[in-house]
Amino acid sequence: MEPVRVVLAGAHGHGWWHLSNVRRLTEAGLVELVGVCDVRPVDGLPDGTEFSGDLAALIGRTGAEVTILCTPIHTHADLAEKALLAGTHLLLEKPPAATYADYLRIARAARRTGLACQVGFQSLGSGAVPAVRRMIAEGAIGRVTGIGAAGAWERPYSYYGRVFWAGRREVDGVPVVDGALTNPLAHATATALAVSGAEVRDVEVELYRANAIEADDTSCVRLRMDDRTTVTVAVSLCADRRHEPYLIVHGERGRIRLTYTEDRIEFDGTSVVHPRTDLLENLVAHLRDGAELLVPLEGTAGFMRVLEAVRLAPPPRAIPDVFQEVGAERRVLPRIAEVTAASAERLALYSELRVPWSRPFPGAETGTGDPSGAGDGPVILAVPPQARPEDAYPHDLPGGRAKGDAKDSGKGDGKPGAAGGAKDGAAGPSASPSPGVSAGAARPETGAARPETGALPPGPGPGAGPGPGAGPGAGPGAVRPEPARPVLVAHGRKVAEYVVAPDMPRTSSPRPYLHPVRTLAGTTVTEVAPADHPHHLGVCVAISDLGGGNFWGGRTYVRDAGPSWLGDHGVQRHLEFTWSDASGFGQALAWEGPDGTETAREARSVRAVELIGCWALEVSFTLTNLTGEPLVIRSSATKGRAGAGYGGFFWRAPASSADRRVFTADAEGESAVHGSTAPWLAMTAQKWTLVFVQRDDPWFVRVEEYPGVGTALAWDTPLVVENVLRRRVVTVVADGRLSPREAAAIAEEVAW
């Protein structure tokens, strides 16, 4: 076989590596270096190698078959087009081009000439990449739920002074895009996309810089793929040392770790290193033997979409010196390797990890501002609620643990129909921007509760007195609306609103509730007064029979008679907000029976807790018996209706949500989890996941008839409250569909 005649365009910098590789392949008889094109002289070239500054002319004189193009990024399109039109195949160094338009220009030239173009993503020559794809196809980890990439290298100041375009976004108005994501650590994105195999649907970008450069030296992206998986890439050039970059492929039944610089796959306790094929060797084999190209130009379209999003994003946010270790030779972001690792684990952006320098502060664009108020907590932080007296509760309260499967159709007389209220996916004021480029959107570091009309001082709120239908002997009526509506905030977004005193019929057992509750992306995950059960009110505390009063709404189940209207509806009346802080609020409530007598007094606590990439709603309540005698809690199940043990905390999700699933750590499906006592339970739909965590009561679950999850205070045995009843439920609210493994991990995180 005749050696392939090769010219190298760009022999300085990384070009020296290509020169060395060409020498190796020359000795193997595969190639012959016939020319070098550069604007500066190159020493040490093999005898007979022609040197020129004119690429097209050099190709013509030497009869080259392949051009290796290793020139500045912004010159790729012009020179690649020249090389192809001059008649050579192309090994094009990454990134292929500085803009998506230039990428298409190269692609058109390749199609027009029929010549091959291989892109120099060396990691894609590794046998580890197809090996991971085979493992996925064979079901080694079940359905893939996401891919997270992390990379943290160190670079001295001299790195950005080595050439005029280093660390630049543009040179004289011409795009360069020489940032961490798009050049030195571009392989992280390219490898993740190669493993995924799906198409990029949209891109979120966060760009930062510690160094005095134009481009990013610390950045992350989140890609939404057309197969509904998520890919994240988090990188930095400001680490204390080199940390080998890697991918984690998350699956429903396990995970695969690929350290792509080492061609190493770690899975289920094993570690295997795979061989790597040199991309120039592969190109030669393609030309001589018809071998398939490992990195054809058309296979890098997804990467170029990411590069384009980075190019079009606002300039990187400067990271103030206070967050850095500024040395004589380089800048270091403390613990940045841990941050990139957390991103890969949680598929989260830096702002969602609550990294201090990802938050807004004065002078953020120049790096000179005062970051006070940006937070001084740990780099990776999930904020547990502060302990309060009502959170310390005993665990010796009685409660049945039997299981049933009857439906909750006795409450309410409406026929199943279209659900009312907010629809799944309806974005309120806090909805995230539409899909596309979202750059550097930093968010506040703590969850917050605030009313729409002002602060929440302790004391009675407006309308706290008895409203219509709340007084003694009142029949069906309405409770006066409460204008001061607390709003919960997480990651800088409104995630829930609290309706204090709703205006509704007495037959719905008026009570406070949370609605709408939203994911961080703005998807509504609650429903109020749906047609199938008009007394279902978002997220609330409701009991079907407390001392003979119906605090659930709808009809009351009567043994041997079935659901009946008894005129026994109670009301939960707002007394005062007892405390409020950045995380939530406390409320005092009177539970008044149908005759207006106060049966119990409740101390309720509601908090939003920020987690990595999602948030959690914590609801705790303490119910004090005021009757002077044992207060009995009953459910329809305790009266003979098997499986209808509802009563306690209850979450009504939107009936419009498609593809609903429910599972615990060891069971899946409504019949399997209904009545179970698992420490956590997850309900998922196409756009959201709710993970419920509590440790006291069986779960009441509906999926098929309507989506609802609650606790069962009196599953099949009445619960007697002598003095005080305390309960606490934490619900994680996440975008997308979490796997059982992911749900278990996040449940453990919030089980404070």
Image: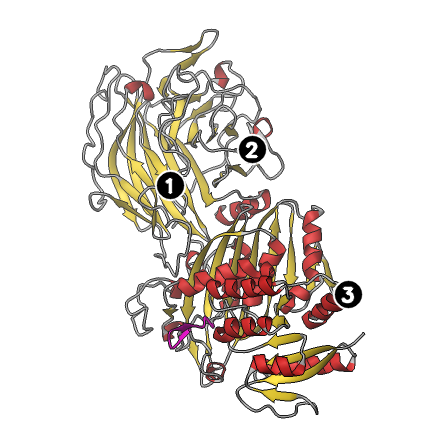
In the foreground, 202 or 50: 50
Task: Give the residue number, with chain letter if any, for mark 3.
Answer: 289
Q: Amino acid at mark 1?
A: Glu
602 relative position to 4: left or right: left
Colour logic: secondary structure
- Toward which corner of the image does residue 605 lie, by quadrant? top left
Work out which quarter of the rendered image holds the N terminus and state it: bottom right
> Mark 2 and mark 1 in contact (Cβ < 8 Å)?
no
- Magenta stretch: dominant SS? loop
Sooner in the amino-acid sequence: mark 3 or mark 2: 3
Q: Amino acid at mark 3?
A: Asp
Q: Which stretch is magenta?
A: 169-178
Judged from the image, the secondary structure of the residue bearing numbered disc 2 is loop
Q: Residue furthest right?
A: 1
- Toward which corner of the image does residue 23 lie, by quadrant? bottom right
Q: Amino acid at mark 2?
A: Thr
Residue at 38% over, 65% down: 376
Q: Which mark is residue 677?
A: 2
In the foreground, 684 or 205: 205
For label 3, the crowd category at 10 Å Cα-Cα, with few meaning under 14, some 14 to 19 and many 20 or more, is few
Task: Give the residue number, with chain letter if any, for mark 1.
Answer: 390
Q: Which mark is residue 265?
A: none
For label 2, the crowd category at 10 Å Cα-Cα, with few meaning under 14, some 14 to 19 and many 20 or more, is many
Residue 732 x, y percent position in the rendering: 46, 43
Position of 363 relative to 625 (above/below): below
What is the C-alpha distance between the residues marked 1 and 3? 75 Å
Judged from the image, the secondary structure of the residue bearing numbered disc 1 is helix
For label 1, the crowd category at 10 Å Cα-Cα, with few meaning under 14, some 14 to 19 and many 20 or more, is some
